[in-house]
Image (spheres, rainbow, N blue to C red):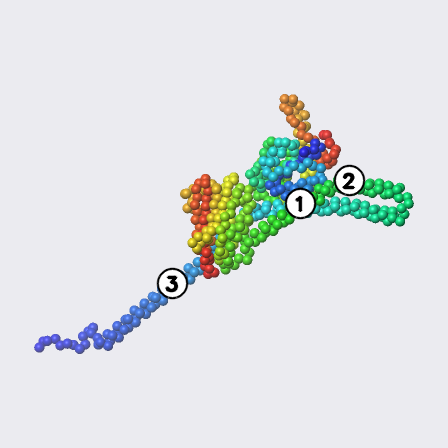
Amino acid sequence: MTKPDQPTILCVDDEPNILSALKRVLRKEGYTVLTATSGREGLALLEEHAVQLVISDQRMPEMTGAEFLKEVKDRWPQTTRVILSGYAEAEAILDAVNNGAIFKFLVKPWQDQDLKQEIRTCLAHNEEKAALYEQAAENRNNPEFPVVPPRIWSHKNPDKQEVM
Amino acid sequence: MSAPTPTPHEPGAEPPEMVSQRAFLRERAARKQAEDLLEEKSRALYLANEQLEQELAERKQLEVHLIHSEKMASVGQLAAGVAHEINNPVGFVTSNVSTMGEYLRVMKTVLSHYEALTADLKAQLEIGQPDQTDSLHSLRSLQSGLLESITQIEALRQEEDLDFILEDAHQLLAESNEGLRRVKDIVQNLKTFVRLDESDVPKMADINQCLTSSLSVVWNELKYKCQVHKDFGELPPIPCHAGQLNQVFSNLFVNAAQAIEKQGEVRVSTEVDDGFVVIQVTDTGSGIPPEKLSKIFDPFYTTKPVGTGTGLGLSISHGIIEKHKGRIEVDSTVDEGTTFTIYLPITGIQADD
């Protein structure tokens, strides 16, 4: 499902129509887009696929976006996490920032062009982070402490793989 | 001889007409005094009455303010939910419309290629018709030219995902339509809920309809936690202040949802029983312990965390139901749930109530 040279984005929202709209926006952007309608489903996808960017709604049944992203942060710290929400009280934003360590808080309704730009920014950030992780792994230089290097890719041109 | 002669003018003795005159005067004085007293008392009574009436009016005014501010507080509380409910559909509809523009651009591009192909075909048909002598050669070159154009178009269709776009356009429009319908419904329900046109005069309203619109306004508070079962009996319309009753109902629904911690059920039922419309709202939430049960209708009594409740909801609900000559009852078991039952007389509320 995931192509090795494309960044993978996971979108989580309990509203399927939002997911199809997001898929449409990202259709030509050269990403692999995974979708899930609940936090639990999202976690299951993360177990199977390497994901660089997770975009989640805040208000969802069972598991809120902040709760979901907290678990994502704990288990897959190299992901970049973003909330895309229609409305959130201060409490939910605090929760998402402090516990989910989100990179951005985006709002619905969104402008497609802006959203694409935000996603590019997020992926660039993730790329930098991945490079730092790799650097750290090299510096550590300890075979008894295995660090799996994250996949490196370029968001600018999905066909060309950049090696840093 | 020495018999006492009655003196005609004994001291103290008066002629009878004088006596009656005096008695008359005395009586008049007494009457005057009584009348003065009466007037004084009735004046005081009048003033007291006037003051009472004024206080009553002030109290009524205060009550109106209180109901209003509670309503504002709960509206504020609901705003978050409603904003979310509206921004979701507006979000995907906006995005879909912009995607549709992109689809249209692709369709136009492909269509222009087809138009070019048609023009080529036409031109070649016109050339081909009058002269058929060296037909084989020109037919071959014509065919290869056409084939090339067709291959180009096929490639373009593939590149632009035209088949997907044509398929998805329908889906996109259906989803957007659904989104717009939802926004329309929310606005409609909000309007029914607040009853902007509400006056002091009670109007005929269908309680089932009130419950439905209240339920949809607070839906965002319920949908993630509760399964809602509606069991509505047939009800006659009753004269009432529907806006105020909506306030009562939505308050009960929000309470029910807040009593449920993770997942639960909320049951709403209505029926007519012995001249009363009976409305029951049952939740499978945490329940209310007996020692707290007696306090729940007290103003400012709340067990909710700061910022979640005003402590006025149920006391104001109680007031509103009382104003409708009805009554509200509660029955609760800890860890099992709570049932609120409202009885509203079918005769409803009259204009001067």
Classify residue A27 as left or right of residue B194: right
Name the foreground residue: A133 vs B190. Answer: B190
Name the foreground residue: A44 vs A50. Answer: A44
Q: Amino acid at mark 1?
A: Gln
Label 1 lies in what chain? B
The CA distance from mark 1 to mark 2 is 24 Å
**Which percent across, then down, holds residue B76?**
55, 48
Where does label 3 land, which residue? B45
Name the foreground residue: B347 vs B309. Answer: B347
**Which percent across, then down, holds residue B102?**
72, 45
In front of the other: label 3 or label 1? 1
Label 3 lies in what chain? B
Q: Choose the circle earlier in sequence order: 1 or 2.
A: 2
Taking the spot 24% from the left edge, 76% from the top edge, the residue there is B18
- Identify the image quadrant of the C terminus of chain A: top right
Q: How many marks?
A: 3
Q: Is residue B137 visible?
A: yes
Where does label 2 land, which residue? B155
Q: Amino acid at mark 3?
A: Leu
Where does label 1 land, which residue? B171
Q: Choose the circle earlier in sequence order: 2 or 3.
A: 3
